[in-house]
Image (spheres, grey):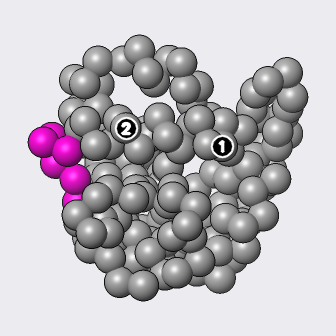
Amino acid sequence: MAGVIRQLGESDAKKLRTIWIEALKAEPEMYEAFCASIEKRPLSHFKKRLTKGAVFGAFRKGKLVGFSALRPVLSPGARHKAEMWGLYLREPLRGKGLAMELIDAIEGFAREKFDVINVRVVDKNRRTRRFLDRVGYKLYGIERRAIRSGGRFFDVELRAKRLL
């Protein structure tokens, strides 16, 4: 399923805010942010997110239906790495190729600046874990009890892909 994938700019901040909140409400245990804190943040917070690193959006029929983002690791000795966060697609569009298009956009952008992309994924998220396996993100560790949501704890897999 072809969609339009493009890097989001500051003018897309409201769209990003809407779909980010949607992602957090749909699958709160899959993401490390809490919906209530995101909903309270001003639009300027989302504009700032769009200028630090890169956020790519998947559009279908002109509507933002998914996103993924990349942020640089700021530690001086780790500036060759970036972290991917927020891979999300609306449920009816999953398994149709848009996630691969988002990953291609993220990796294409990252290859110009970084050697490695790290990603964290909740271990209960089997679908995303299988997808990341297929596209070359190798497991290198597990953070036990990394997320607490709704009184439950979730482990997080640490994964990475070398771009060189």
> What residue sits right under mark 1 in the picture?
27
Q: Considering the image in quadrants, where does the N terminus appear?
A: bottom left
Which residue is at 44% across, 40% downward?
20
> What residue sits right under mark 2 in the picture?
18
Closer to the camera in the image, 103 or 52: 103
**Which mark is first along the chain, 1 or 2?**
2
Callout 1, which amino acid? Glu
Closer to the camera in the image, 157 or 127: 127
* Magenta highlight range: 7-12
Q: Tag 1: Cα neighbours inside 10 Å, few (<14), some, or many (≥20)? A: few
Callout 2, which amino acid? Thr
Which residue is at 41% across, 15% downward?
40
Closer to the camera in the image, 61 or 83: 61
Secondary-structure class at tag 2: helix
Q: Can residue 4 be seen in this snapshot? A: yes
Residue 155 position, x and y percent, is: 82, 43
Q: Tag 2: Cα neighbours inside 10 Å, few (<14), some, or many (≥20)? A: few
Q: Can residue 111 be seen in this snapshot? A: no
Which residue is at 27% across, 69% downward?
61
Residue 35 position, x and y percent, is: 55, 26
Which residue is at 58% across, 61% downward?
91
Closer to the camera in the image, 52 or 31: 31
- In this rendering, position of residue 86 left or right of residue 9: right
